[in-house]
Amino acid sequence: MVRREAILDTAFKIWGKTNFTQMSLTPIAKHLGITKAALYKHFQSKNELLQAMEQRFLSRYREFHEEFFKEAEGLDLSRAVHLFLEKVLRFYLGNPYFLSYFYVWLLRTRMAERAEIVPLFHRQRELFHTLFHEIGIQTRAEELEVRLHFLYICATFWVSTLFWNLNECKHPSQLYNPEPIAVKEWEPALDRWHRYCMQGLASRRGLSKEVSQDENFYKKIEKRVVFPPPPKREHDRIFQAIVDVSAEVGIRDASIERIAEKLGMSKSSLYSHFRNKRSMFESLIREEQRFMLKVLKEKLSSFSGFAERSYGFMYITLLHTLSNPSLLSLFNWFRFQNIRIPIRSPGKSFMEEYFSFFYDAQSSGELSCTQEELLPSAVLLHVLTFRSLQDTDAPSELNESFLIKIRAMHRLYLYGLSTPTLFKESV
């Protein structure tokens, strides 16, 4: 007799193969050799099955944290960070398709605010507050939140790089399931990311004096960024229609039909200038990419050194996103509609252009990462920027309170968790 657990296992496996973009009950029933009616005896709807999948993920997520807390007793900060990274690695390697489920499904909401997860993060704060204190880092509440946010993002992102298919677009949500090899095979990568979390991406020589002066370093960069208004486009009407319909009926129910109706046209008319739905959304994204690439090239060329350019990248990206609420709504709508559009054009050339300042910094010796680590390091900066926006109570504009957190995240990106001088002037 098919049990609920077998259905859950199969749902993760079948839906996980498509990164949870195709979630029909039919292939699950077919794989198990049962009818959909038999499946409904255990789960009355797809919604109920999804809720059970979420509970399984959260239950096992709690379990690995409990193991971490138990084994972290008596460890110093460095060993505790290493243990945490290892636990995250084991969690995702040992649970097929959990990582793609996390990116595609759970990141739609703030997982840290869920009632069953809140106690874990309280214990995490207490543990790391003590560990930071032991090495002379006095962490106030906001500073501790930023450090732990940085650690969680880095840990999950690092594991996701092990799941990247090198022949496809390098983005955390586009994953394949790696062969179930022993964790020891990943130990060299584990050690590298541990060193990064503890020391930082960039070498300190030539940067520490420049950045540690005071907040004026960041404020000078921010004042130099005068953002040009984006060109008026027909596509802006589609962006705005998505915003309006999402506000009226919610993101989940903002269908193509309703968006077309809001625009005063038929669904077929909406597609009239595109081959299909996918090409329509690809066109929207490509146009946005071209605009951002032009702005980044123009603005970052006036900055000198990796410290300035990496923060300039964060600031420009956030400023543009927050000043264009329709753009942020579009990205959220993509996620909730399970529309998987690559974030870049095929080929490496676009990434080399978009993150050209990384390649320049490595050539000049400013970056301590290897050639194979260069692209993941660049994508991590992009992820830290957007997750800082989506995982916190981001304002509608870049006010000083939010900028303090962004500056702090940038410092961590450069120097790592254990630099005692971080935040002394910002918190």
Image (tube, helix red, strand yellow):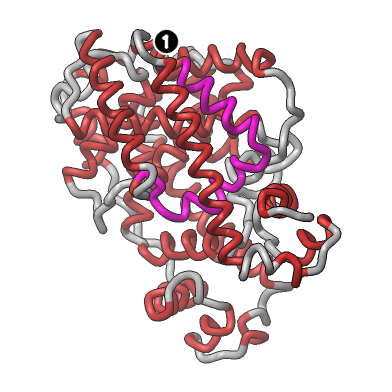
x and y percent of residue 36 in the render? 76, 69
Instruction: Determine whether, in the image, residue 100 is placed left or right of residue 243.
Output: right
- Side of 10 relative to 52 (left or right): right
Numbered range of the magenta stretch: 83-112
Q: Which residue position is annotated with label 1?
A: 79
Q: How many marks?
A: 1
Note whether 317 is above or below 364 in the view shown: below
Q: Amino acid at mark 1?
A: Arg
Residue at figure coordinates x 68%, y 67% from the top left: 41
Quadrant, the N terminus: bottom right
Q: Is residue 305 above or below residue 314?
A: above
Percent x, y for residue 148? 34, 30
Examine the structure image and report whether residue 412 is included in the region drawn in magenta.
no
The residue positioned 64% from the left and 36% from the top of the image is 95
Residue at the extreme front = 1
Residue 202 visible? no
Residue 89 belongs to the span the image colors magenta: yes
